[in-house]
Amino acid sequence: MSKILVVEDDLSIQALLHDFIEEAGHSVVLAADGVEALAKYSEQPFDLILLDLMLPKIDGYGVCEVIRQKSDVPIIMLTALDGEQNQIKGLDLQADDYITKPFSMPVLLRKIAAVLRRAAKLDETPQTIFYKTLTLDLGAYKVYSKQGSIDLTPREFEILRELILHQGRILTRQNLLQMLWKYAFLGDERIVDTHIKNLRKKLGEADYIETIRGVGYRIDKED
């Protein structure tokens, strides 16, 4: 049974969410404003947070930002604000999904199940991965080679991690943007090329990245 924190100031919607989510087999804790949400969050662990954005005292963006400083707990944002910039702001704060009101309760329950499945898979991912002369500490975002520690930016580390986790598979720019930026990227896709170029320079002799011209990038499977 998953424990879900539902943060919603509209008491009728709050009651509806409570009943449907509990009926689906989850345990539910309720909060009606941002301050109460952070207090409840600090009291006990949760498997997922369903977070309304238009909240009294501290809005949902503020709540998400505070929680993200401490935890990667899955967060699904609920809001009547359906503008693109509002969605991008939420996703930039590393929300896992964004649902606009009015919403279908069966669809919401399926999204909750999908986010919980993704989180469970991430928990199964090893905290250290190895590839030839490279060691990646996934929790600390650190990379080591025979020459010692390699200083990468978070985005460079994430690109290297995804290439190694998908050994033998070609990852296109769009693949990497979707994996790491988590939303439809509106800028120049070649920002990926810039990160790859800088990553290769820092890896030096440990540069195992192969360019597949006109397609993308790959780190091949170890022999």
Image (spheres, rainbow, N blue to C red):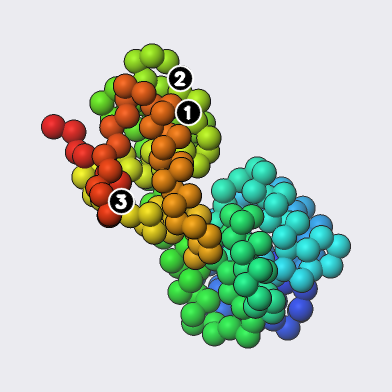
In whole angstroms, how far apart are the C-alphas of marks 1 and 3? 24 Å
Label 1 – label 2 distance at C-alpha: 7 Å
Return the residue nearer the eye: 173 or 5.
173
Q: Earlier in the sequence, mark 1 or mark 2?
A: 1
Direction left: furthest residue: 223
| Mark 1 residue element | strand
Q: What's the amino acid at mark 1?
A: Lys
In percent of width and height, residue 179 lies at 43, 55
Q: Check if mark 2's residue and mark 3's residue have beta carbons within 8 Å.
A: no
Left or right: residue 206 versus residue 83 is left
Residue 35 in view: yes
Residue 108 badge: none
Question: Residue 133 falls in which quadrant of the image?
Answer: top left
Mark 2–mark 3 Cα distance, whole angstroms, equals 27 Å
Query: Which of pointers 2 and 3 indicates the residue nearer the eye?
Result: 3
152 vs 210, nearest the viewer: 210
Residue situated in front as seen by the camera: 80 or 151: 151
Q: What label sits on residue 142 in the rendered view? A: 1
Q: Provide residue 170's location: percent of width, then percent of height.
A: 26, 50
Q: Which residue is mark 2?
A: 149
Q: Position of residue 53 (x, y in %)?
A: 72, 68
Q: Residue at x 81, y 60 (%)?
A: 58
Above or below for 190 versus 7: above
Name the quarter where the C terminus is drawn.
top left
Front tag of 1 and 3: 3
